[in-house]
Amino acid sequence: MKKFSTHVGIDVSKSTLDVCILKAEGMSVVGMSVVPNTQQGIRRVFRELRHLNAYGDDTLFCFENTGVYSVPLCLCLSEAGLPYWEVPALEIKKSKGITRGKTDRTDAQDIARYSVRSLDKFKASSMPEVEIQRMKVLFAERDKTVRALKLFESTTEGAAFLPPSIYKSVESQNRKTIAYLRKALRAIDAKIRGVRERNEPLNAQYNLLRSVPGIGDVTATYMIIATGGFKRFGSWRKFACYSGIAPFQYASGSSIRGKTRVNHLADKKMKSLLNMAVLSAVKHDPELKEYYERKKHEGKNPMLVLNNIRCKIVSRAFAVIDRASPYVNLKKFAA
C-alpha cells in the first residue's frame, strides 16, 4: 500500500472548489482555500502546493464524484500526471459518523481525513477513454429523448375520451413533435454506432456481448459505458453488485433473520436493462427457458429465478469478453 505524505481534500461544486491540504503525519491542516472550478483555479491550487513543497507523486487528491462538475479537475490532474481518487459521495457521507451542520469548508476537511483513514481502499482513478465519454453523453441524450417520446405519445390515449374538436387542437402539433423526436432518436443512435465502430476494441466488445442471448443493442452499449470498456470491474460478481442484482443476507444475532435480498443501491438504468434482457433470454434461449420452468416447478419464487438468470447473463457477458470469443450455446450440441 502506497503512503502519501500530503492529502488534498476537495469539495466540488458547480462554480467553486473548496480545498483542504492535510499532512498525513499528525492529521494537521496546512492550507485551506476556495478557488473557481476552472483550469485557472486548479492551477492556483498547484501553485500553493509547490509553495508548501507538496506538489508531486507524494500528494494524493481526493474528491467526490459529482458528475460533470468534477470533469475539469479530473482533466487537469490527468494531464499533470498526479494521483487522484474519485470517491462516491455516499461512501464519504457514511464514513463521517455522527455530524451536526454542514459547510463546504468542513466537507473538504472531511474528504481529506477520509483519504488518510481509508488509504487501504485506495485505487487510483483515471479518465475514461474519449470514445466512452462520447458514448456516455450521447446515451444520456438518447435516454432523455426516449422519455420525451413516451410522454408525447401518451397524448393519443386521450383521443378516445375527448371530443374530436378538442383533440384536433393538439393532434397536428403532437404528431409533428413525435416525428421530430423519432428522427432525433435515429440520429443519436447513428452517432453512438459511429463512435463505437471507429474504435476497434469497443466494437469487438459490442459484437461479443451481442452474441449472448438476451443482450441487445442498447444493453450492450450501456454495459460498455458502465464498465468503462470492461476495465472498472475485476469480476462479474462486482458488476452484479453495482447493477443491484447481487443478493445480500440480513441477519444479526440469533433473533434477526431477514430475507436475503438485493440492495437498492445500484445503477438503476443497468438494472432496468438487465430486466429486459432476462425476459428476452427466457423467451429465446432454450437453456434459460428450461432452467426457469424447472426452478418454478420446484416451487422457487419466480422473481428469485429471474434474478438468478440476470446473474447468469452478466457472468456470460464477462466470460465472452475475457475469452475474446463469442458465446456458444452448448445445449444444442447435447445428445
Image: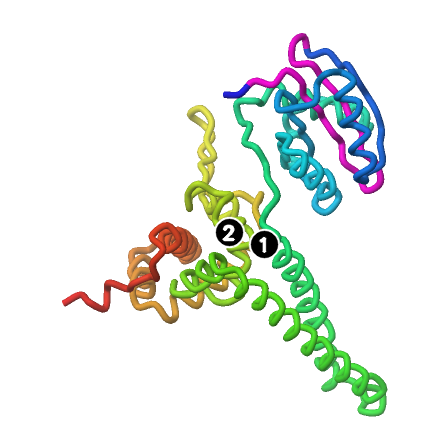
Q: Residue at x 23, y 68 (%)?
A: 332
Residue 154 shows in the view: no
Outermost residue toward the bottom? 165
For residue 320, which quarter of the picture? bottom left
Q: Secondary structure at mark 1?
A: helix
Circle 2: residue type: Gly
Q: Is residue 118 left or right of residue 55?
A: left
Q: Residue at x 65, y 29 (%)?
A: 92
Circle 1: residue type: Ile
Residue 246 is situated, as x and y percent measured from the top left of the image, at 45, 45
Q: Residues within 10 Å of mark 2 (few under 14, many from 20)?
A: many
Q: Residue at x 71, y 24 (%)?
A: 8
Task: Decide whether the magenta segment is chiefly helix, strand or loop.
Answer: strand
Q: Residue at x 44, y 56 (%)?
A: 303
Q: Which mark is residue 229?
A: 2
20 part of magenta stretch:
yes
How many numbered callouts?
A: 2
Outermost residue toward the top? 26
Q: CA distance from mark 2 to mark 1?
A: 7 Å
Residue 122 is situated, as x and y percent measured from the top left of the image, at 55, 28
Q: Is residue 18 above or below residue 265?
A: above
Q: Nearer the viewer, residue 279 or 224?
A: 224
Q: Is residue 257 left or right of residue 46?
A: left
234 part of magenta stretch:
no
* Span of residues in magenta: 3-26
For residue 105, which quarter of the picture? top right
Q: Which mark is residue 132?
A: 1
Q: Secondary structure at mark 2?
A: loop
Q: Are marks 2 and 1 in contact (CB under 8 Å)?
A: yes
Residue 291 is situated, as x and y percent measured from the top left of the image, at 30, 60
